[in-house]
Amino acid sequence: MSVLVGKKAPAFNTDAVTNGNQIVENFSLEQYLGKKHVLFFFYPADFTFVCPTELLAFQERIKDFEERNVAVVGCSVDSAFSHWKWLQTELKEGGIKGVKYPLVADLAKTISENYDVLAGQYDYNDDGESVFNGIPQSYRGLFLLDKEGTVRHQVVNDMPLGRSVDEALRMIDALQFFEENGEVCPANWKKGDKALKPTQEGISNFLSKK
């Protein structure tokens, strides 16, 4: 598994569905450069079981992300047409109607490969034919990008393990606090807690007050 933290997020240009109903071409995260932080996450597939709980959970907290000036963007190996259909399907029928943030189509699986969250890889069999070894879907990867497009946090879960929206927001708060104040965030830090200066004296002062 590649560690992308500290590196520029891999670029892409592809189809996506925005606002819950509009298929757009040439969607890219570059539109947010210099303007917003980005929470870019992968999920295995449309019309599954754990995935809708995650996508709906992010939508339920979308105002919390907007207040932090963070763009939320999802991605799976499905087509834009599959995304669109899922977005039009009622919740009681297994859909995610009401999700408004962009869903990126990674039908070629190249975005998942570049972020190293694809659960398998292409290979050749003994007859020289191209085959895929593994599951042609993405693990539950989540990447937090700063305004310069650099990955500052990543976490990757196996497919059965849903993620925590609260933890995603906590990491955003920590990154933005550091960017604004230059102080670093200790274990279990949350917004409103004291941080510490990145010096030996700062660490000693912080620990002495615990």
Image (cartoon, rainbow, N blue to C red):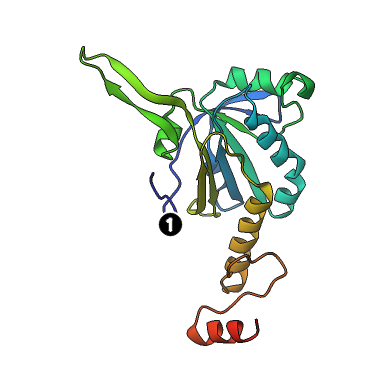
Residue 128 image position (x, y, % from top left): 21, 15
> What's the residue at 54%, 86% (across, down)?
204
The residue at 65%/50% (across/down) is 70
Q: Is residue 180 left or right of residue 124?
A: right
Residue that appears at 79% across and 21% down: 92
Quarter the N terminus occupies: top left
Q: Nearer the viewer, residue 57 or 9?
A: 57
Residue 194 spot, x, y in % from top left: 67, 75
Q: Residues within 10 Å of mark 1 (few under 14, many from 20)?
A: few
Total numbered labels placed on residues in the image: 1
Q: Which corner quadrant holds the C terminus?
A: bottom right
* Residue 185 sits above or below residue 88 on the image: below
Q: Residue at x 55, y 20 (%)?
A: 79
Q: Residue furthest top?
A: 127
Residue 143 in the image: above or below residue 12: below
Disc 1 designates what residue? 6
Of all residues, the one furthest to the front in this rendering is 160
Q: Decide if residue 24 is on the left or right side of residue 126.
A: right
The image quadrant that residue 56 belongs to is: top right
Q: Could you tell me which secondary element the residue under label 1 belongs to?
A: loop
Please state which amino acid type lies under the numbered disc 1.
Answer: Gly
User: How far across and how far down the image is residue 57, in percent?
Assistant: 72, 39
The picture places residue 55, in percent across and down from the top left corner, at 67, 35
